[in-house]
Image (cartoon, helix red, strand yellow):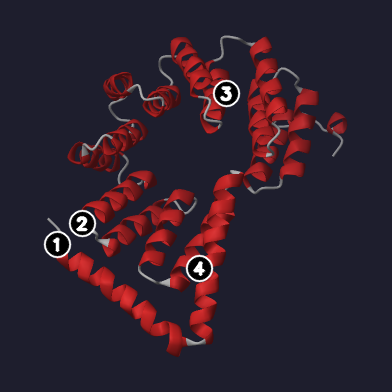
Amino acid sequence: KDFSSAKAPHVAPSYALTMAGMFLHLRGNYAEAMGCYDYALQLQPTSIEVLLKRASLWFEKEELPKALADFETAIGIDAGCADIFCHRGQLYILQNDLGSALADLRKAVSIDAKSVLARIQLGMALHRHGQQSEARRVFSEAEKEFPNSPEVLNYFGELLVESGEVDEAKAKFEKALSLSSSKFALAHVNLGVLQMHLQQDVEGAIKYCRRATEVDPLCETAHVHMAHLHLQMSNLKEAVVSYDKAVALLRMKQELVDCFSMREATAAQLALLELNPAVYGPAMEQHRARFAEMAASNPQQ
């Protein structure tokens, strides 16, 4: 459409293009999404929101210098925008450049102490960097500052799990669900992970993951965990279905490659089983029996 001939649009063309680009981006239509972001920036060159979205897309396309260039452009427009440093800090975490990530995330928190995302990312970056005491302090302060945030509680719980404080972690996950009316999917997944590792209760873990997919069908983490659990139970058809759902949602290249590889390996096992069930069926049944024995020897508390 020729925007110049349109009469008093209800939505600014640059905003419409940004939203279109975002939806195309989420669907994996990178070329079309990039076109929308580029056009939006032609109409509104100082839009930090579009620059950040385009930087994310550049990163997913593995063009890191272009992503960093968009961040620098955004800083030149408004060096006091916390979102710029928060999102660039996340990018550095994904690159495992934790020193740069910590610098950006600390700056984001100093600019906007009310940013829940910046606090969470700072805490996780500190944890990965081995600065456990400071990471715990950041999360403790965040929980006091944002007592009704399921996100803070969930990620604090993940830190506690990795520190071996399982009971405390479980309490955080359960509180996150209580505050979100049981709609925070990742807390369901984390409780499922605890169920599996503490009690070898695969069926219980699957129930948690299934609940996560019910409250948020777009939670790729839930689908990935569900697939792994079904695979451990030798439920190959169910595993392939869950891997397919995860593949449709994942956007980071390495995660997508890993998930698709597992999907193909599982599908190959399923094809062998269907081709010659007399040979491969007994092995699958033995595998299921071993899991049943493990569950029986680790009764739920």
Dot 3 alpha-carbon crowd within 10 angstroms: few under 14, some 14 to 19, many 20 or more = many
Secondary structure under badge 3? helix
Q: Earlier in the sequence, mark 3 or mark 1?
A: 3
Task: Identify the residue at horizontal 44%, vertical 10% (top origin).
Answer: 110
- In the picture of the structure, the residue carrying the numbered disc 1 is 299
Dot 2 alpha-carbon crowd within 10 angstroms: few under 14, some 14 to 19, many 20 or more = some
- In the picture of the structure, the residue carrying the numbered disc 3 is 88
Q: Nearer the viewer, residue 15 or 129?
A: 129
Q: Amino acid at mark 3?
A: Arg
Task: Identify the residue at horizontal 58%, vertical 55% (top origin).
Answer: 248
Q: Is residue 148 above or below residue 61?
A: above
Are the residues tagged 1 and 2 within 8 Å (C-beta)? yes
Are the residues tagged 3 and 4 within 8 Å (C-beta)? no
What is the distance, in whole Å, between disc 2 and disc 4 at their CAs?
25 Å
> Taking the image as drawn, is residue 251 in sight?
no
**207 lies left or right of 8:** left
Q: Quadrant of the N terminus?
A: top right
Secondary structure under badge 1? loop
What is the distance, in whole Å, between disc 4 and disc 1 at their CAs?
29 Å
- In the picture of the structure, the residue carrying the numbered disc 4 is 266
